[in-house]
Amino acid sequence: MEGQKLAVMPIKKLLLNMGIPIILSMMMQAAYNIVDSIFVANIPETGEQALNALTLAFPVQMFMVAIGIGTGVGMNALLSKTLGQGDKEKASFVAGNAFFLGIVIYLVFLIFGLFGVKAFVASQTSNPQIMDMAIRYLRICCTCSFGIICFSLMEKVLQATGRSNLSTIAQITGAVTNIVLDPILIYGLLGLPQMGVDGAAWATVLGQVASAGIALFFHVTQNKEVKNGLSYMKPSGKIIGEIYSIGLPAIIAQALMSIMTYGLNIILVGISENAVTAYGLYYKVQQFILFAAFGLRDAITPIVAFNYGSGSKERVNEGIKYGMIDTLGIMLIGLVVLEVLAVPFTGIFGLSGETQQICILAMRVISLSFLFAGANVAYQGIFQALGGGMESLIISVCRQFLFVLPVAWGFAQMAKVNHEMIWLVWLTFLIAEGLSTLIAAILMKRIRASKIDGIKNSNKLAID
């Protein structure tokens, strides 16, 4: 039935049918990151310092997600393929090895949380108050990271067996848990002590544990295709190799976001701590819009991939065309929203003075890059669908590393001399996304000539 829908449903309708649930799920994830920041930023007297501390911790949290999701992506593809071949025994070993990898990943972050957090935070700031808050926050997130790692894997298992609606329920459960616990633990409501940034960390990890617990329950009770047990968790080099042959590019692409944020924190702190705080806040607001584009990209990929595999040139071209149009539409809306509501947004977070002005400037300058960013996100989904994993990775490297950190560093040297020139640093994103779009268009032309133009239409069915 799913294959029939991919084959015959009109592309415009299909994009909405598949994209909206994914977009809502990803925007919910971004929303509770923003809510976290709102509560933290409004801590009396130390709100901006606390927000700065969360910004310094954010690259490690992103890296956790990168490894968890990347491992999950590899497991998802291999598990789906194995189930499609009717080999339930191997499928159980694939899931079991993924759970084994989850334990290993957690132990790595546990050790980092115990022994590496202080050095990591100290590399980004020398302010003792901010450093102390960031260390406490990040240590809790790392030592209790089993929740986010477990959920990253459970989510992909449920999606691989066709139960993505259950993974969405689990994710929403965690988001609601986090949002409810934030004010209670941060401000000390209902008779509990005021915990500040520690409370934000505990709300985050408890929300992640709630998501993981619900997803695990769904897996055990609903995924009858996959057997569970310690015997299936015995590590297999062959299976682990197959998982990461698919998942490693996804890990690298996600990890680049972490590296970019870490590098920018170091660059910006050379200008002022207010610049770090402003960028951290902007980045979380921006995620709400970018995650919507990512959700649509995750709908574009299977649509184009299925119709490319079935030999429907017309539907492949329609998937590319309407996928690009819809993604650009999302980013255009985001551009208008940030340009118009930049001042009210910063007010919600309780910013004032120089930090507020820097954040408003960041929103208004960086958001100009959204249309290029939307094209790049869509191109990446299209490349993946057509077997162009390397092309997709090239765009990730360009837009999140190669054209960002060197350019931002150069502009930051000017901003150090004259703080009013900090807008040049924010201009980095427009330059990076624009150049990356140019490269993506060249790569797309090459892929179109080699993979699409030679397709002979074999599927011209459509339903209303």
Image (cartoon, rainbow, N blue to C red):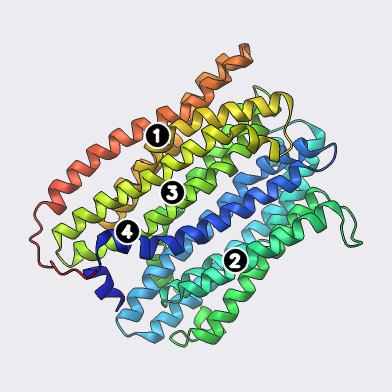
Q: Which residue is mark 3?
A: 253
Mark closer to the observer (1, 2): 2
Residue in the image at 87% along x and 55% along y: 188
Contact? badges 4 and 3 (CB < 8 Å): no
Q: Which type of secondary structure does the marked residue at label 2 adopt?
A: helix
Packing grade of label 4 (10 A; few <14, some 14-19, many >=20) is many
Q: Which type of secondary structure does the marked residue at label 3 adopt?
A: helix
List x then y, in percent, for residue 350. Answer: 74, 37
Between discs 1 and 4, the one toward the N terminus: 4
Between discs 2 and 4, the one toward the N terminus: 2
List x then y, in percent, for residue 239. Answer: 41, 72
Q: Which residue is mark 4?
A: 301
Q: Is residue 41 above or below residue 275?
A: below
Between discs 4 and 3, the one toward the N terminus: 3
Between discs 1 and 3, the one toward the N terminus: 3
Mark closer to the observer (4, 3): 4
Q: Which residue is mark 2?
A: 172
Q: Which type of secondary structure does the marked residue at label 1 adopt?
A: helix
C-alpha gap between disc 4 and disc 3 = 16 Å
Q: Which residue is mark 1?
A: 433
| Amino acid at the residue labelled 3 | Ala
| Amino acid at the residue labelled 1 | Glu
Mark closer to the observer (1, 3): 1
